[in-house]
Amino acid sequence: MRLIGCLLLLSGFFVALAALVLLPAVLTRLVFVTAGLGVEILGVALLTRAHTLMQKERR
Amino acid sequence: MNLLLCLVCIMLMPLAAAGLALIHQGLGRSRSAAHAMLATLCALAISAIVFVTIGSAWAGFAGGSAHSFAAGGVRWDWLGAVEFFPSGIGMDPADAAGYRRALTLCLEMFAAGLAATIPLSGGTDRWRLAPACLASALLAGFLFPLFAHWAWGAGWLAGLGANFGISRFVDTGGAGVVQVVGGLMAVSVVWILGPRRGKFAEDGVPAAIPGHNIVQVLFGCILALVGWIGLDSASSILFFDAGPQQVVWVVINAMLSASAGGLAAVLVTRARYRKPDASISANGWIAGLVAGSAACAMVSPVAAIDTGIVAGVLVTYMIEIAELRLQVDDPGGAVSVHAGAGLWGLIALGLFGHFPDGTRAGHMLAQLVGVAALLGFMLPLIYGANLLLNRVAPYRVDNDGDWQGMDIRELGAGAYPEFVVHADEFVPR
C-alpha cells in the first residue's frame, strides 16, 4: 500500500509535467495540473492509511 | 541592491531556529527537554557544515553552472553543479557578483538549519539523537539543496516563465523551499517513528500529553517572528531584487500574517473549546508566518491578513484531524504548521499576488506546478530516503527510553534535576 501511495504521488507529478509540455493553452494546463494534484492527494491518503493500519497492527 | 541590509537581515535568521526550538521543546515532555534543545543545536551545526561543504554545490545560484537534460523540447535545469568546499567567494571588494553569491550561501546555510529543526518537532520525545543528526545531514546535504536550486537557484521551477510562457514559480521567503520541505521531512519522521507510548489507546482514542512549558512556547513565537522577518527580507532582496521600500512591506506583511494566524487560532479554539488553547494558538501564529513567507511584499496587507487567517483556521483543524482521525502523533504540530500552511501560502500567492506581468491563471498555474513538485516528487523522495536511513540507524528509542524520557536515556541527566518527579500519568505500566 505504501509503494502504491508513492507511485500515485509520482504519477500525479508526471501528469502535471506532461500538461506543461504537451498542452498549449493555460486553462487546459491548469485543469490537468489540478487533476495531477488530485492524484497526488490520493497518494497521500493511501500512505496515511497504510501507516494508520500499521499502527493498529502494532497495538 | 542593498547588500548590507541583506546581510543584517540574514543575521536575524538564527532567531527563527531558536524560536522553533523553544516551541518544540516546550510542547514536548519535561523529561525530554534537554534532549530536544541539544538535538536542535546538533541539527543546526550539522546542517551548516554539510550544506556549506556539499549542499551548496547542488543548490547552485542564478547564473552558475547546473546539471540539466533536454526533454519535450525544453532544457530541464534540475541540480546545481558548482564547486564543493567553496572558499574565498566575494572577498574581493570589487567583485559584487561574488559578494552576492556569498550572501546566497550564508542565507541558504541558515535556511537549511531552519528546515532541519522542523522534523525534530514531529519526532519529539522518541527520536534518537544520532539518527536525527544523520537525517539533518541528509536534509542539508541533498534534499534541501535540490528544491532550493529549483526555486531559488534558477532551476526548472524558476525557469517556468522562460520555458513555458506562463510565469515563474515564486517562493519569496521559502514557504516551499524551507517550510514545506522541512514539513514533509516531519511527516516522514512521524510516520516512521509511530506514536509515543501511551498516546493512543487500544481503540485508537488519543490521550492528551500536554506540553511541559507553554511560556517558552509563546516566547518562542516572538523570537520566531524576528527570525522570519530576517529570512523574508533577505530572500526578497537576494532572489527578487527587493529594495528598502519593499522590505518595509515585507516586515509589515509578516507581522500582519502572523497576527491574523494567531488570532484566528485563538478565536477558533475559543469557539470550539470555550477557552483559547495556548499551544494551538502558538501554532496558528507560526502558521501565519509560514504561509505569509511565500508572498512577502508581493501581496497587499489585506491579502496578507487573509492568508494568515486561513492558515490559522486550517492549522487548528489539521492538528485535530491528524490526531483524532489519522492517529498521527505530532507533538509540535510540525506537519500541519509547516507542510500544511506552507502549501496554502504558495497557493495563496497565486490567488492574491500582485505581479507586474502575466495573467492570474498563468501565475496560479506556476504555483500549482510548484505544489505538485513538492507533493509528487519531494515527498516520495524524502520518505524513501528516511526509510533507508531508518534501516541503517533505527530512528526510534526503545520502549524503556520512551518511558524514561530522552534526557535520562540518551544524555544521562534530566533538564530539570531539582524538579520533583511525579508518577507517570500518561504511560501505562
Image: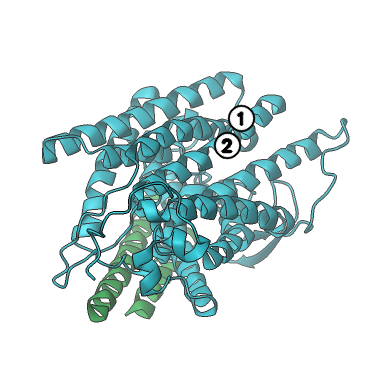
Chain colours: A green, B cyan
Q: Secondary structure at mark 1?
A: helix
Circle 2/circle 1 CB separation < 8 Å: yes
Q: Residue at x 49, y 70 (%)?
A: B386
The correct choice, above or below, for A48 with respect to B124 in the image is below
The correct choice, above or below, for B91 with respect to B212 in the image is above
Q: Looking at the picture, which amino acid does disc 1 mark?
A: Cys
Which numbered disc covers residue B121? none
Relative horizontal placement of residue A41, taking residue B164 as reference (left or right): left
Which numbered disc covers residue B13? 2
Where's residue B177, x and y in %?
52, 49
Q: Residues within 10 Å of mark 1 (few under 14, many from 20)?
A: many
Tell me which chain the residue with mark 2 is part of.
B
Where's residue B13, x and y in %?
57, 36
Question: Splitting the image into 4 quarters, where does residue B208 fall?
Answer: bottom left
Tell me which chain the residue with mark 1 is part of.
B
Relative horizontal placement of residue B179, taking residue B81 as reference (left or right): left
Tag count = 2
Where's residue B127, x and y in %?
44, 64
Q: Residues within 10 Å of mark 2 (few under 14, many from 20)?
A: many
Q: Nearer the viewer, residue B165 or B277?
A: B277
Image quarter hosting the C terminus of chain B = bottom left
Q: Secondary structure at mark 2?
A: loop
Q: Nearer the viewer, residue B127 or B412?
A: B412
Distance between the alpha carbons at the discs numbered 2 and 1? 7 Å
Image quarter hosting the N terminus of chain B = top right
Q: Residue at x 64, y 41 (%)?
A: B107
Q: Nearer the viewer, residue B381 or B21?
A: B21
Which numbered disc covers residue B9? 1
